[in-house]
Amino acid sequence: MGLILILAGIAGCFLPVIPGPPLAYISLLLIQLTNSPPFTTSFLLWMAVGTAAITIMDYFIPAMATKKFGGSRYGIAGSFIGIFAGIIFFPPWGLLIFPFIGAYLGETFFGNDPKTAKRAAIGSALGILSGILVKLSFTIFIAYLFFVNAPWT
């Protein structure tokens, strides 16, 4: 069961409808149910905090990157709207494309020039990719902990 959760967690790093890191974290909890639990309670609590932080940050990284690349609050709002529209209407590719489009439209609709809008949209896309990399890195770390501490090793 833990292996299935790890695989689903890795898939969830790319597919927005699957909560990747939380699923992978559950695999660590399953190992605790064995005869000799490998993790301390404080370690599991810190991993839970990390899992929650990464899951929440994943929604804010594109907006922060949009701002860093010169986007205004309109581009940030467009990026947020794009994230949720992409998740709802066109997963998983919509999550990569819609924040870009949302940031661009938010900037151009409220009077910014196309060059600024394009930079803000690129920032949004880079933010999405950064979020995926952070989630994937954390999930691979959890997978490592799982395999090293699995009862069959």
Image: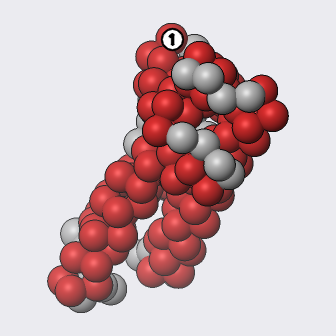
Residue topped by disc 1:
89
Furthest residue in direction right, as rendered: 115
Furthest residue in direction top, as rendered: 89
Residue 90 locus on image (x, y percent): 57, 14
Furthest residue in direction left, as rendered: 41
Residue 132 locus on image (x, y percent): 61, 50
Q: How many marks?
A: 1
Q: Nearer the viewer, residue 49 or 35?
A: 49
* Identity of the residue drawn at 49% across and 77% down: 145
Residue 81 locus on image (x, y percent): 45, 24
Residue 20 locus on image (x, y percent): 47, 48
* Mark 1 surroundings within 10 Å by alpha-carbon count, few (fewer than 14), some (14 through 19), many (20 or more): few
80 with respect to 105 (left or right): left
Q: Nearer the viewer, residue 74 or 79?
A: 74
Judge whether residue 119 can be spotted in this image.
Answer: yes
Judge whether residue 20 can be spotted in this image.
Answer: no
In the displayed structure, would residue 153 be above or below residue 113? Answer: below
* Identity of the residue drawn at 55% across and 33% down: 75
Q: Name the residue type under label 1.
A: Phe
* Identity of the residue drawn at 22% across and 69% down: 33
Q: How is the image coloured?
A: secondary structure
